[in-house]
Image: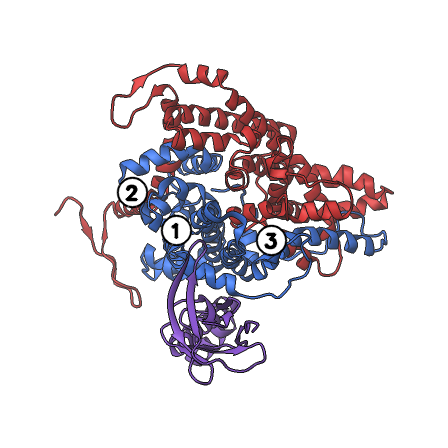
């Protein structure tokens, strides 16, 4: 008798004859486990290589003097000290913070649009499509479009402003110290408005209608209903939109690169642009890694803050 | 996603819809103006050289589009973009479905993996560019299609979309299949996937849009003008020619069209993928 | 589901219809191009009165975004018409001149595809020099 032991299953008509081994459940379970891990490995490998490992390596790099061909030395906090004294870093940090701080404005705008789209107007699907159409576009193309709109000589905005006699001379939007960053910001809001709207719409539709009915029976006005029912129940969606808004200060790399290349003297340069420049144009990979560490910390802190302010909800919006 | 009849304020109160229509029309107008202006410039180009620009197209023609096709290696850029996006889509659908199926089963460490994936969502791509470049270099994949597509081979959002779809398949169906002796692979191919075509569509759309529009990663990885994708080609065209020709805007329109067409075809799937879990994976 | 039912279901699916239509359109367009791209350009040269000019030289120039170069020259026949048979570009400029009769304006000919066969509507007009 072999070690595993072979037990023949009783032959029943209509059932396949499956020989079972003692411990069959164990080896079947092992096979299943093997399958599970085999199925998980490709995705996990991609995430390990391109999310987890880079995060750790960034941290390590930020403490080193990295060299591709020579010797990599450990340099402690040198890069962070350089950063502290680096004027460009503070400018780009300020620009990034301004970008992030403007997210609530975009969200408020999107909330207004969502409320309108959610009401029972006819053709609301068409409005929704039109507003959302700007999101799936290539950001480089969006940057070129807006660059053209802002053109000093023949741009549409200058034309309209001058036609309405609001200004005498054309405004050099993308070449001015004060206007370059707001100009890029406006292009970003244009593109992301649809995304905010979609998230807020999903949140609005998850609010049970009987709450409103009960409230109106109790005599609550529309404004009270909005403040007491809609807003609190929208907190997860608003938090999600806020996180997206913070991330746009990273994804706007394309816009800044195409529209202003960092603008007149870094006035429209974002942290992500500085990181790219430091790593790939100034060949300071280790310094760029340190900058990335700071950027990531900023993201984490702001997300945590937003989470606290929106009631501690994790934020993912459930679909039906 | 159907917009259900659910107003954000009291349904009992009758209010006129006209102010809402006007406001929405205004918003739609603002959103559409950039499209219109670029379309007009790509068709006429006269407002590049003439001020004040006319608001309607003057003598429109399609010859800027012909210029874009012939004067720059548009076909080459298009081919590169298509190959990279194709790789990304195929890998995405396969890997995400596999991972999601594995996650529908119960095993030790499942909770840990899920938490890990959720926290990986918080790491945006832009915070990984420096090491990702070094890793790709060490793998010898710089300036190659695989290197361009590799970071986008799997997205966490789509894994969870698949998982939700797989979880919705009735257990009785799976059990009956098991009794009939179907192997795991057959169960996936014959039952799970056909019942999850919506999730597959979502995955395809999302991975296409993200890999097609991706600019930063190709900018870092591509060293050879022959390997440039469309966004890089567009940016390079801008650098060389700036505002001297309407062909730049024709290039923009040509580049935007696939995204717009795909979006209009598959709005529901696209929106579903975006709302079911958020930030870019 | 039988084959006929499957096909009719597939055709009604927008994910099948749109790529199918696109493929047909692109295939048809390419077929049209291959049939009409011999590089033939026909035109004529006249004076300001409309009289045909024989023996005028028509210069062909090609231009891309930055450079402009001369590609060749043809001569009009007795009826003032000229025929170019080796045009390989989609954007050429033509200018006629004849000794003693001055030069015409430069006429830009933009085509939809390279070497498209085209017959020019507007003639090249030579200003007759004052006696």
Q: Is residue B13 visible?
A: yes
Q: Earlier in the sequence, mark 1 or mark 2?
A: 1
- Count of numbered tags: 3
User: Tags 3 and 1 in contact by the CB under 8 Å rule?
Assistant: no
Q: Nearer the viewer, mark 3 or mark 1?
A: 3
Mark 1: which secondary structure? helix
Would residue A123 appear left or right of B47 to someone viewing this image? Answer: right
Letter of the purple chain: C
Judging depth in this view, the residue of A129 and B130 nearest the camera is B130
Letter of the blue chain: B
Residue assigned mark 2: B141
Q: Chain of mark 1?
A: B
Mark 3: which secondary structure? helix
**Could you say which disc has been placed on residue B88 in the image?**
1
Judging depth in this view, the residue of A149 and A220 nearest the camera is A149
Q: Earlier in the sequence, mark 3 or mark 2?
A: 3
Q: Is residue B101 above or below residue C54?
A: above
Q: Position of residue A77 (x, y in %)?
A: 41, 14
The CA distance from mark 3 to mark 2 is 44 Å
Q: Position of residue B154 (x, y in %)?
A: 40, 46
The tint chain A carries is red
Q: Residue furthest right?
A: A219
């Amino acid at each position: 008798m072999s070690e595993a032991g072979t037990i023949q299953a009783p032959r029943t008509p209509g059932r396949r004859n499956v020989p079972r081994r003692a411990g069959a459940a164990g080896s079947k379970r092992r096979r299943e486990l093997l399958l599970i891990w085999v199925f998980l490995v490709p995705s996990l490998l991609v995430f390990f290589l391109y999310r987890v490992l880079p995060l750790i390596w960034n941290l390590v790099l930020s403490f080193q003097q990295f060299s591709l061909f020579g010797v990599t030395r450990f340099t402690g906090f040198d890069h962070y000290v350089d950063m502290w004294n680096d004027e460009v870093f503070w400018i780009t940090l300020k620009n990034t913070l301004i970008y992030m701080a403007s997210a609530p404005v975009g969200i408020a705008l999107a909330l207004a649009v969502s409320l309108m789209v959610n009401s029972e107007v006819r053709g609301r699907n068409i409005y929704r499509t039109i507003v959302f159409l700007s999101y799936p576009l290539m950001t480089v193309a969006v940057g070129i479009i807006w660059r053209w709109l802002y053109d000093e000589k023949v741009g549409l905005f200058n034309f309209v402003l001058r036609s309405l006699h609001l200004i005498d001379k054309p405004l050099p939007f993308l070449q001015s110290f004060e206007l370059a960053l707001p100009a890029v910001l406006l292009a970003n809001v244009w593109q992301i408005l649809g995304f905010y709207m979609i998230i807020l719409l999903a949140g609005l539709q998850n609010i049970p209608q009987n709450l409103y009915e009960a409230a109106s029976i109790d005599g609550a006005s529309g404004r009270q209903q909005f403040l007491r029912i809609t807003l609190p129940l929208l907190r997860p969606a608003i938090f999600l939109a806020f996180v997206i808004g913070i991330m746009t200060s990273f994804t706007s790399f394309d816009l800044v690169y195409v529209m202003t290349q960092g603008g007149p003297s870094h006035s429209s340069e974002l942290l992500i642009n500085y990181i790219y420049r430091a790593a790939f144009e100034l060949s300071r990979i280790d310094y760029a890694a340190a900058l990335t560490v700071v950027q990531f910390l900023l993201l984490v802190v702001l997300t945590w803050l937003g989470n606290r302010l929106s009631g501690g909800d994790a934020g993912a919006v459930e679909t039906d | 996603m159907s917009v259900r009849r659910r107003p954000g304020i009291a349904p009992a109160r009758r209010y006129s819809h006209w102010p809402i229509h006007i406001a929405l029309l205004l918003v739609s107008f603002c959103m559409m103006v950039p499209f219109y202006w670029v379309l007009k410039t790509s068709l006429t180009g006269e407002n590049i050289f003439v001020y004040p620009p006319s608001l309607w197209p003057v003598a429109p023609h399609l010859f800027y589009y012909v210029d874009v096709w012939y004067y720059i290696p548009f076909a080459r850029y298009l081919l590169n973009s298509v190959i990279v996006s194709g790789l990304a889509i195929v890998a995405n659908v396969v890997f995400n479905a596999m991972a999601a199926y594995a996650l529908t089963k119960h095993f030790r460490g499942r909770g840990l993996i899920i938490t890990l994936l959720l926290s990986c969502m918080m790491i945006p791509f832009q915070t990984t560019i420096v090491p990702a470049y070094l890793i790709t270099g060490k793998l010898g994949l710089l300036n190659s299609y695989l290197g361009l597509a590799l970071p986008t081979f799997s997205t966490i959002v789509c894994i969870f979309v698949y998982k939700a779809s797989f979880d919705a398949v009735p257990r009785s169906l799976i059990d009956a299949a098991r009794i009939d002796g179907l192997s795991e692979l057959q169960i996936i191919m014959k039952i799970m996937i056909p019942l999850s075509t919506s999730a597959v569509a979502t995955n395809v759309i999302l991975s296409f849009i993200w890999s097609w529009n991706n600019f930063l990663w190709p900018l870092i990885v591509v060293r050879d003008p022959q390997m440039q994708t469309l966004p890089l080609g567009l940016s390079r065209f801008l650098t060389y020619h700036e505002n001297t020709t309407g062909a730049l805007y024709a290039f923009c329109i040509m580049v935007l069209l696939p995204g717009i067409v795909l979006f209009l075809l598959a709005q529901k799937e696209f929106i579903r993928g975006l709302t079911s879990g958020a930030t870019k994976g | 589901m039988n084959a006929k039912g499957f096909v009719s279901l597939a055709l009604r699916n927008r994910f099948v219809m749109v790529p199918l239509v696109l493929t047909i359109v692109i295939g048809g367009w390419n077929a049209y191009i291959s049939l009409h791209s011999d590089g033939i350009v026909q035109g004529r040269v006249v004076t300001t009165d409309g009289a045909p000019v024989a023996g005028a030289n028509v210069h062909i120039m090609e231009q891309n975004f930055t450079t402009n170069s001369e590609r060749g020259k043809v001569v009009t026949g007795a009826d003032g018409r000229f025929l170019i048979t080796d045009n390989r570009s989609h954007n050429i400029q033509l200018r006629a001149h004849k000794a003693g009769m001055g030069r015409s304006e430069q006429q830009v000919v933009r085509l939809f595809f390279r070497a498209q066969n085209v017959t020019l509507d507007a003639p090249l007009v030579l200003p007759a020099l004052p006696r």
